Amino acid sequence: MQKITVERTKHPRSKPQDQSKLGFGKIFTDHMYIMPFDREQGWHDPKIVPYQPVSLEPASMVFHYGQEMFEGLKAYRTEDGRVLLFRPDKNIQRANRSNRRLCIPEIPADDFLNGLKTLVDVDKDWIPTQPGTSLYIRPFVIATDAFLGVRPSDTYLFMIILSPSGAYYEHGLDPVKIWIEDDYVRAVRGGIGEAKTGGNYVASLAAQVKAHEDGYDQVLWLDGVERKYIEEVGSMNIFFKINGTVVTPQLSGSILPGVTRASCIDLCKHWGLPVEERRISAQELVEAAQTGALEECWGSGTAAVISPVGALRFENQVMTIGDGGIGPVSQRLYDTVTGIQTGTLPDEFGWTVQVNA
Ligand SMILES: *Cc1c(COP(=O)(O)O)cnc(C)c1O
């Protein structure tokens, strides 16, 4: 494992006073992690430096052909002052799966984890403490060759930045309204849908704008070929409870394999609920809603953890899920996952990693 050089800022900024106004992704901490790659030295010379702009040539490949990978996870402070990461090994494995798909050199897992832990430890005083708040961690890699030809870059930067983030739900869990998109598609099997990369997000913007204009919070994507089968929400995986069974789309190659998704499946099975990973058509949901079999629906992702869905629109029909409120499985998953993350519940599955010794 490579030794990280730490250069601490001489000008620490004041931390946000009002933790109820943090929002998401707007404020950054005092430090960042940066590690370059070139073909001669591989990944080398990792540093923690004061948070600052990076200087790049306008010809840098990332600006033109989008060769980049990102991750997202969170650090939490427990009541007894420990700092915990939630399943960082899963994010590191996924980052390297994304890297392989995107022709970015893999990052040694031990250097990646050491970078996460060391940076979070340096900036641990930025971790907000109010219920529901956390420190969002954004690792990412960009291609930096100054070259306009199309091929994988020979040089890269791996960076990690940190952002204190507010409670996703200011007044407890709040059901969202979701638009099932039947015109635009996000990803196809064999494409980059199962990689965490900016290209999937730019592909999603037009539908998101359209859904927002119609008063919907998020877009639920259908498969890119037949436009019949449910895939996932913009930055969340999706679950349904139909006739007592928890159902979620199988990982087909066009869906992002969420860490929260995996945790939901593990917990539901642990609780003895039947869980099916399979194809689900939008038509099946319409019919289940009509007969009352569609009992619950929720999204899962690092930012919101669990996002209960109150209504789904497909073509010209609006389905109300359950009574439009928060279902019992959604609530139990939210309480359990956040309890493990913040150390108020025992970590029976060994999911948390402590940052400070
Ligand atoms: C990150 C992401 C998710 C959720 O993954 P988590 O690991 O649970 O945060 C789901 N879908 C997409 C497209 C994503 O980028």
Image (spheres, helix red, strand yellow):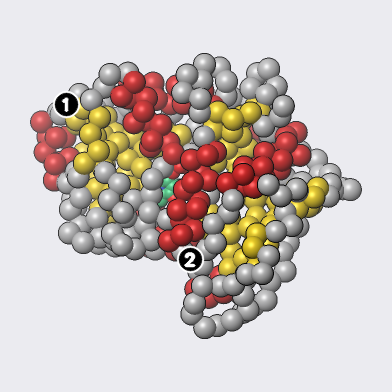
Image quarter of the C terminus: top right
- Secondary structure at badge 1 equals loop
* Kind of residue at badge 2: Cys
In the rendering, at what x and y percent does residue 67 appear?
51, 67
In the rendering, at what x and y percent does residue 66 appear?
50, 69
253 vs 335, nearest the viewer: 253
In the rendering, at what x and y percent does residue 238 appear?
32, 40
**Residue 103: mark:** 2
Residue at image position (76%, 39%) is 122
Q: Left or right of 325: which side holds 130?
A: right
Q: Left or right of 217: which side holds 145?
A: right
- How many other residues sit within 10 Å of disc 1, few (<14), some (14-19) or many (≥20)? few
Residue at image position (68%, 17%) is 80
Q: Left or right of 355: which side holds 282?
A: left
Is residue 190 shown above or below 250? below
Rendered image quadrant of residue 76: top right
**Tag 1 residue:** 243
Residue 189 in sight here: yes
* Kind of residue at badge 1: Asn
Earlier residue among tags 2 and 1:
2
Residue at image position (19%, 30%) is 242
Is residue 69 shown above or below 162? below
In the rendering, at what x and y percent does residue 220 appear?
31, 49
- Secondary structure at badge 2 equals loop
Residue 295 in sight here: no
> Mark 2 or 1, which is nearer the eye?
2
